[in-house]
Image: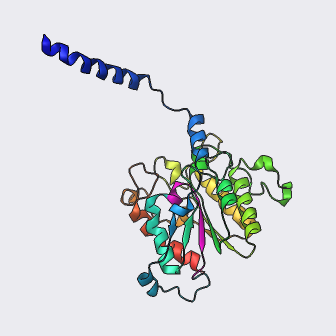
Amino acid sequence: MRKLLLLLPAFLLLSSVLQAQEQRTPPTPEQIQAYLASLRPEPEKHHLFPDAEAAKESPYKGFANYGKRIAVFGGSLSVNKESDAAKQQWANQLGTEVVTYGVGGAGFSIEQGCSLQKQVDEAGVYDIYVLWASTNDYVNSRPCGNPLDYTALDNYDEGKLNTQCGGINYCIKRLREKNPQAKIYFFTSLRFFGQDAGHNPFSTAPNLTGQTFVQYVDAQKACCAYHGVPVLDQFSMQDVDEHNYELFYQKDKLHMNEDGYRRIAPLQVSFLAQ
């Protein structure tokens, strides 16, 4: 009996903890978005420098962009720790600093997390700007929009900054204003494997806006065509599909592991060197 009395407080404590866990409700989509929007770029924490020894062996010495400082904007795929496996290669091969303003959950739409619009607003002056598209606008069903959203043709209609296209055009315009001589490069969204539409270019499965992931990627390229911004079509040139993605992606089938970044890094370096 005494042992039972001694165990009673522990039992009551455990019971109260389990009840609290059962009563805890998951966050709503609105709460999640509010949290993502509250995040801010941390460029001081994501600042890579070239390795002196590795830079000596670079085949890109003498190329136009060798030694030019690079700023990167995007979602988690641009800023998570695994991405350093690629960006350190940029730094080493191009003999330059790489500073990342990307924030997890961000999209081009002003409504998607700490959007690339906000990231660009906070950025300083660099020689090269890289806009790295995420999957967040598509997955969260932000409107894709029209490639001419927020351009001179609609008198820079701020009502269209909630679309992916309006956000892309805003970012390019703002970066031109920050440094008219800077080069802007665009990386399309990478593939993801949690659903067929994320990697199958012929999928007709849409998000809640009625558009497919490939339509979002095509719109990214169309926006850049309007501005004459070079595009690295990572979706088409990633060399990863349903047969080998498990080697290059984390278990969530969305974020690449370090091997995935190492696989695409040479393509990125060659593109940025020109």
Q: Is residue 69 above or below residue 123?
A: below
Residue 36 visible, this orientation = yes
The one nearer the camera, 105 or 259, is 105
Question: Picture coordinates of residue 255 (x, y %)?
Answer: 46, 54
Q: Is residue 175 left or right of residue 69?
A: right
Question: Picture coordinates of residue 239 (x, y %)?
Answer: 46, 66
Q: Is residue 142 above or below residue 169?
A: above
Picture residue at 62% right of the left edge, 39% below the top: 208
Question: Picture coordinates of residue 44 (x, y %)?
Answer: 54, 63
Question: Picture coordinates of residue 139 (x, y %)?
Answer: 57, 45
Picture residue at 35% right of the left edge, 24% below the top: 17
Looking at the rendering, the stretch of residues picked out in magenta corresponds to 67-79
Q: Is residue 100 left or right of residue 247?
A: right
Residue with the most extreme bottom position: 62
Picture residue at 37% right of the left edge, 20% below the top: 19
Q: Is residue 58 above or below residue 233?
A: below
Q: How is the image coloured?
A: rainbow
Picture residue at 68% right of the left edge, 52% below the top: 164
Residue 159 on the magenta span: no
Residue 266 visible, this orientation = no
Q: Is residue 247 left or right of residue 186?
A: left
* Quarter of image, res 8: top left
Q: How many numbered marks have been drawn onto this rendered protein structure? A: 0
Pick the quarter of the image with the N terminus: top left
The one nearer the camera, 199 or 66, is 66
Q: Is residue 170 above or below residue 140?
A: below
Pick the quarter of the image with the C terminus: bottom right
* Quarter of image, res 226: bottom right
The one nearer the camera, 244 or 21, is 21
The one nearer the camera, 151 or 213, is 151
